[in-house]
Image (spheres, rainbow, N blue to C red):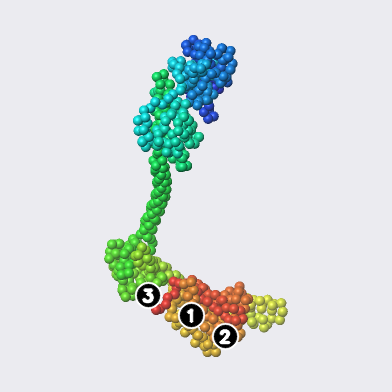
Amino acid sequence: MSITEISTVLAMNRNTVAKYMDILQIQGAVDGRKRGTSKVYYQSERLPVTSLRKICTRPFFVIDHEGMIIDQNQDFCTLVAMTGDQVSGHPLENLPLRYLDGIQPGQLVRAVLKGTEQRIRAQVRQGEKIQSVILLMVPVVFENGRPGVSVIVDLDNPSADISRKDTTSPDILALLDDEMEYVVRRTAEGITRYVNETYCRAVGKTREELIGRPFKPLISPEDADRIQIHLAGLSLKYPVGTIEYRVVMANGELRYQRWQDRALFNSRGELDTINSFGIDITEQVLTAQKLKKTQETLEESIVHRTEELRGINRQLYSEIAQRERMEEQLLLAQFAMDRATDMVFWIDQDARIRYANDVAAEGLLYSRIELLDCQFGDLVPFYSLEEWDLLWQDLKNGRSVSRETYLVKKDGTGIPVDVRLTYLEFRGKEMVYCSSRDLSERIRMDRALKEANKKINVYTSIARHDIQNKITIVLAYLGRIKKAMTDPVLLEYLNRQEHAVKAIRTEINMTRDFKDMGLRSPEWQNLPAIIAGIITPYEQKSVRIVSDLPEVEIFADAQLDRVFDRLMEKMTGTGEPPREIQVSYQIRDGALMIIFNDNGPGFSAEEKDQLFDIQNDGSGNRGLFIAREILSLTDITLSETGEPGTSARFEIQVPETYYRFLQETQI
């Protein structure tokens, strides 16, 4: 347990716990080791060195943490034929011990100092005699808390001569030569005593070159360490072990082998011989490696495909969410269309109504189901299927149609409406979207406004006539007074009064030009007919007028002819009248451009800036000002775009929904 865990269990301060653990470690009651940045404690299994002499009846000696022998008993001195002074105070390497299995005693001592018990085989040289022993290395603790090592010698194994001789039967050896496996027999010290022909062929050496020499296959240092540990683990309890490693063969080829080692012990329990049986497993290893690589590739493919699937799922979730949003928008659009204030219809190519909203059903006194059984011609009686086919093609070519007409109710009465038709295609289905706005209220308001305007015009006409009469009287008296007056100062005052009165008369006369503006509703008017009606008087002034207008109607105020008359008057009324005026048209960004262009001197830059303005004193281009105001009633604009000194050019721009060509099908 760590200090934190101990302090939590005991509910004590960590610093206090750390002090107590240091005391217990000095006493040998606990051991501790570093684990990362923490120190972990566990119960000690060390034997107190003071108890060793009391309980141990075999030869032993004690080593401190610096590897020096500090104590031994008489049985050990007798075993090694040395005095106590020759043993104590000297390092472990001075003892007449030979350690088997290639183990370094210093490494074992360090391992035991850390608390791990070790057992190794060794030999004690006693003159000409060699005694085989087992050294049991036990961790101990001194009175000062420092760790130590107690080495107890096991003398249960009697002495034996280490020289050996292979007495295997020749028939058995011949049988082993025919085996496909490698067969090697070696002594405990690693000296080769027998190899079969199969192994000799594999390593490219004769049997004479191998027997009597250490068994050392050509392997890597890492595998050599593994083999050493493997062989050291063989015992009476576990005499058989298996190990795999890489070997370089005689031809330089790298092969993989699997060896099964069996340790044979003599009657005293000492390791006598190791019989090893090997087999080449290169094909299995390569197959396993390929299988592993294939598995890794498969796992990578699975991961990749899984990520692709996750991406597809994310895309699917996104599309589902988008579709849900679209469905919600469609439902909202459907709800908005159903609750729209205008009458909405969807009409197919056969002029059959496929959809009608609630306002259309209520306004026409039908149910929505009844409207779906109707054709559009049922709502517009003077409308035929032949005309619908022509209109369908025009709409399909990208044009929109807007007309004022009336729709027939179920009871036979009519509703004045403004109808707008637009061609739409959605997912292979062709439809015409029809929006109809009820104009009944607007017509009633227009009628009321016209009546009000008539009354205002009557009143203003009477007032204007009375004011004109009174102005005439005032000007007459001012003329008589001026004739009778000789004082120059008073004459100046009278002239100013006369000028002011004439300005008032001019203002009054200008109101006469506006008295009929907006009195009548705008209407569709034939443009070529209007132009033909106004150019006759101007052709008598030696001006050639050329008109190149198609049969087109524009939706404008009833005083449209006055607009064109004012333009002709302005273009022919200059100091040098033009010899020719051309009237043409263009379609520009969907708008109809009506162009009046001459070959006269045009207007100067100063004149162009004030061409459509009226001054405070009533002067200015009153005719052009009134013309532009008349056109603005239906969103038609008027501008002058000619070059000064070259020509005059007036452009009238009619919006797309305010003109129509007569060759087009109409509702």
The quadrant in which the C terminus is found is bottom left
The answer to whether any part of residue 562 appears in the image is no
Q: Position of residue 423 (x, y in %)?
A: 38, 68
Is disc 2 surrounded by few (<14), some (14 to 19) or many (20+) residues within 10 Å? Answer: many
- Residue drawn 54% across the image and 75% down it: 639
The secondary structure type at the circle numbered 1 is: helix
Q: Quadrant of residue 176?
A: top left
Q: Is residue 471 left or right of residue 156?
A: right
Q: Position of residue 206 (x, y in %)?
A: 44, 36
Amino acid on which disc 2 is placed: Pro
Is disc 1 surrounded by few (<14), some (14 to 19) or many (20+) residues within 10 Å? Answer: some
The answer to whether any part of residue 250 appears in the image is yes
Q: Nearer the viewer, mark 2 or mark 1?
A: 2
Is disc 3 surrounded by few (<14), some (14 to 19) or many (20+) residues within 10 Å? Answer: some
Whichever of labels 2 and 3 marks the residue nearer the N terminus, that label is 2
Q: Real-space Cα distance between discs 2 and 1?
A: 21 Å
Q: Position of residue 353 (x, y in %)?
A: 31, 66
The secondary structure type at the circle numbered 2 is: loop
Q: Real-space Cα distance between discs 2 and 3?
A: 39 Å
The secondary structure type at the circle numbered 3 is: loop
Disc number placed over residue 578 in the picture, else none: 2
Residue under numbered circle 1: 561
Q: Nearer the viewer, mark 1 or mark 3?
A: 3
**Front residue of this view, candidates 105 and 499:** 105
**Front residue of this view, candidates 655 and 464:** 655
- Residue drawn 37% across the image and 55% down it: 327
**Front residue of this view, candidates 136 and 589:** 136
Q: Quadrant of residue 392?
A: bottom left
Residue under numbered circle 3: 666
Q: Is residue 381 left or right of residue 570?
A: left
